[in-house]
Amino acid sequence: MLLLALLAVSPVRASEVSPIEKVIEMLSDLEAKVIGEGKDAQKTYDEYSEFCEDKSRQLGFEIKTGKAEVEELTATIEQETSASAELEAKIEDLSNDIQRDEADLAAATKIRNKEAADFAVEEKELTDVISMLDRATAILTREMAKSGAAMLQLKSATSLTEALSVMVQASALSSADASALTALVQTGNSDSDEEPGAPAAAVYEGHSDGIIGTLEGLKEKANDQLDKARKTETTNLHNYEMLKQSLTDSIEFANTDMDKAKKALAESQEKKANAEGDLEATQKDLDEDIKAKKELHADCMNAAEEFEAATKSRGEELKALATAKKVIKESTGGAAEQSYGFNQLSFMQLSSSADLAQSEAVRFIRDLARKTKSPALAQLASRMNSAMKLGAAAGNDPFAKVEGLIKDMIATLEAEAEADATQKAYCDKELGENNAKRDDLQAEHDKLSTKIAQDKAASAKLKEEVATLQSELAAMAKARAEADKLRAEEKAAYEKNSKEMAEGIEGVKKALEVLREYYSKDSAKAHQEAEGAASGIIGLLEVCESDFTKGLTEMTATEESAAADYKAYCNEDDIQRTTKEQDVKYKTQEAAGLDKRVSELSGDLETVTDELNAVLETLEKLHKMCDAKAETYAERKQRRDDEIAGLKQAQEILNNVALIQKTTKHTLRGTHRH
């Protein structure tokens, strides 16, 4: 039996790895792990370093763009502030002009109303006087035609006043009219020195027809005064209307200018407010970019320092592991051979019933692990085997250690059984929450992706438009250069040709002057043939002069027309170039803003993607853990019950051989003594 036990144990023992070999193997694994971690850390650091460079470059570009925008917006604010101040001063001047014109119009209207009132009073008085004189003249004429005492009294009257008194006594005239006429006559007499031609009452004393003539003279004077007053009123009214129209037009034009100035002021203030708002937002973004760049620099430097420290520490660790492995290999060979070699195991140790029982327990657990296909049991068997070998080598009793391992595994399996019983509720809860979170993140992911695609498309379109505008600007510049060259050539040709033409005209004139002067002398008349030829030459020169003059005139007109066309073309080209350059500027800024927003949205999308991936990874783990497997819960329960029962059986094997272990040891010791 001992020989059979020796043969059974030997292969198992020979196939096992000694602790020293295991330590070396573990050191090698740890070295590989540290090296792998170093490679992963290097890869991560390289990626982070590249991110730092890209992000720093991007922030630098954004800071440069932001500073340019701040300067531009500041210039705009200063320009609009100056424009607003000028417009406010203009509005104040216009307001003062309007107030002054309105005050002048009110004063003129007040004066005009007083003149109209005075005229109305004067017109009424003169009209009443004329009416009264008409009545008095009619009464006198009627009374003069009568005979009797009244007639005698009138004829005996020495003055108009006495005649009026007679008429009052005869009840032919009212006392009020008589008093008014008397006052009028007296006024006429007092004014006679100032107004020659007014009849004096004394002239007509004693003559009835003289009295009537006096009344008619007074009436004529009153009519003249009425006409004069009416002409004066017409003149005053016309002057007032002209002044009123002038002041009204001035007020209207000033109000129109003020409305335009107010509108321009509102637009300037709006531009200023918009620029101030944009400046505040741009300055805020610029400050955030500067702060972000500083933080990025600090983070990247910290990451570099941490990576350097980690690399140094990892190198030191590898150096320590290599040193330890080298020392173990060089210095523990003999000790390991002596401690763990097969020749050090006594025949009595291999034949111990307790060791056989423990080996039987290990084999039982291994068989159970193969039967149930349980990695945990296979690991337990390996740990039990190691515990027995290490305990025996140290001179300790491995029984308690092995039994403890079995008890721990039983407790673990029972805990797993309890956890498996409550797993479904946990799975339902976690799957529901993570599915809802996945749906929300997926919706946010799709929204951000759509927005990024839209902004990228808009940015690409703007860039394409900018490229088109730049191409058009290049074509315009080329055309302008060609036009400048052509214009310079035309002008040079005109200056050369016009100079030659002017010189030709001047030469022809001088030749004509010489010929005319010569052939106009009397001595030339004796040469008829020469004079005839000279006449032909002069006529031909005159034709040439006319042609030269016409050519110069047409040449000058063509040059002026070409210059005007060139100037108009340059003006139109400048306007179009400025417009296109502004379009390029604004579209470029808008595209840059869209690219910045795409970058920000891409960061948000990356964050959402990371969260979504984390949720999907969690869901994958949950599905692996919770979804239906090939093995049902009943099968898992049965397998776990079998494992627990087998472990308890292995534990019972160990407990049953405890007494045998003591007896065997006592017997073997007795045999040794014998």
Image (cartoon, rainbow, N blue to C red):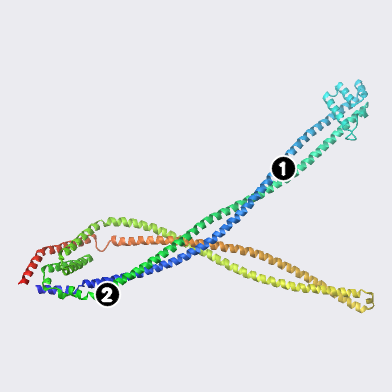
- Answer whether residue 144 is visible to the viewer in this image: yes
Quarter of the figure with residue 130? top right
- Answer whether residue 458 is visible to the viewer in this image: no
Quarter of the figure with residue 131? top right
Check the picture and name the quadrant holding the N terminus: bottom left
Q: Earlier in the sequence, mark 1 or mark 2?
A: 1
Amino acid carrying label 1: it is Asp
In the shown orientation, is residue 98 left or right of residue 523?
A: left
Q: How many marks?
A: 2
Q: Position of residue 579 (x, y in %)?
A: 60, 62
Q: Which residue is mark 2?
A: 326
**Res. 135 mark:** none
Give the residue at x 53% y 66%.
Answer: 464
Check the image and report above or below for 229 versus 561. above
Amino acid carrying label 2: it is Lys
Q: Which residue is mark 1?
A: 104
